[in-house]
Amino acid sequence: MTIKEILNTTNHRSWKIPTSGWKFYQEWNNAIFLHYQVELKELKKIIPKELEIDLYEGKPWVSVVAFTMEKIRPKNLPAFSPISDFDEINIRTYVKSNNKTGVYFLSIEGGKSLSCKIAKAISELPYRFSKIKRTNKKYQSKNSKFNDKLEIEYTVGDIVKEKSELDKWLTERYALFQDSNDSINEFEIHHLEWPIDEIDLKKLEVNYPRFKKIINEKPNKIHYSKGVKVIAWGMNKKEKTSYNV
């Protein structure tokens, strides 16, 4: 499907795409989702006060998403695979801001050091380098500085033909909100609805010491997706406040 066709497919969204021109193209491929229902009081400790934590039936969620980033590029330039293609793990939660529902990243790891530096410089997102190895049906990551480790062995099952409301709530997010030193940065994105497959975990080791109170080795829900083609707009900055919003 062409970029124009993707931009014209919007019925699955809860608000219209931006009228301004898009800035970046990227693909999020072969994604493994580990979803955890967490305690609100623990999550509040690590989320900026300017953002409202989004809840599903009164409970917040945190997800570990391990995938392969491919073909990331500015609008009018070609992708350069030594930089544009790399494995990535993000740990995200679900928030609201400006009448939009989106995600907030607790952590982002990339498997190429230079790619992480460039992505962090352009986006101000919390990218850091980890040693990541992906083979057929295995995904492994290690970060000695933070003592983080992720190891997944899996097989992919049948396509999920009827998604639940929770499936959609956890995956269909079209905004990203992230804090920098003096602002909350908003990014709008667009893609087709995530195709979801069943996944069977043969082995799972999740060890993120900083998040040990919210992430364990037994996710409440798991997904696999072959991926989506993503269109992203530029950053909008909103000055931080000194009070709760």
Image: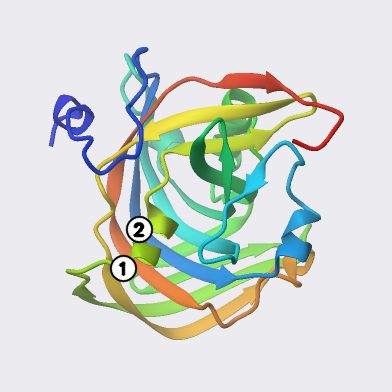
Give the colouring mode of the picture: rainbow
Which residue occupies 77% across, 60% down?
A: 146
Residue placed most toward the observer, 85 or 46:
46
Which residue occupies 40% across, 52% down?
A: 68
The N terminus lies in which quarter of the figure?
top left
For badge 2, the amino acid type reads Lys
Q: Secondary structure at mark 2?
A: helix
Which residue occupies 54% across, 62% down?
A: 63
**Can see residue 80?**
no
Number of numbered discs present?
2
Numbered mark located on residue 168 in the image: 2
Residue placed most toward the observer, 223 or 84:
223
Q: CA distance from mark 2 to mark 1?
A: 7 Å
Rendered image quadrant of residue 73: top left
Q: Estimate the x, y position of residue 157 in percent, counting from the top left.
A: 24, 78
Left or right: 137 in relation to 184: left
Residue placed most toward the observer, 15 or 78:
15
**For the residue carrying disc 2, how many other residues have a C-alpha within 10 Å: few (<14), some (14-19), or many (20+)?**
some
Residues at marks 2 and 1 touching, judged by CB atoms closer than 8 Å: yes
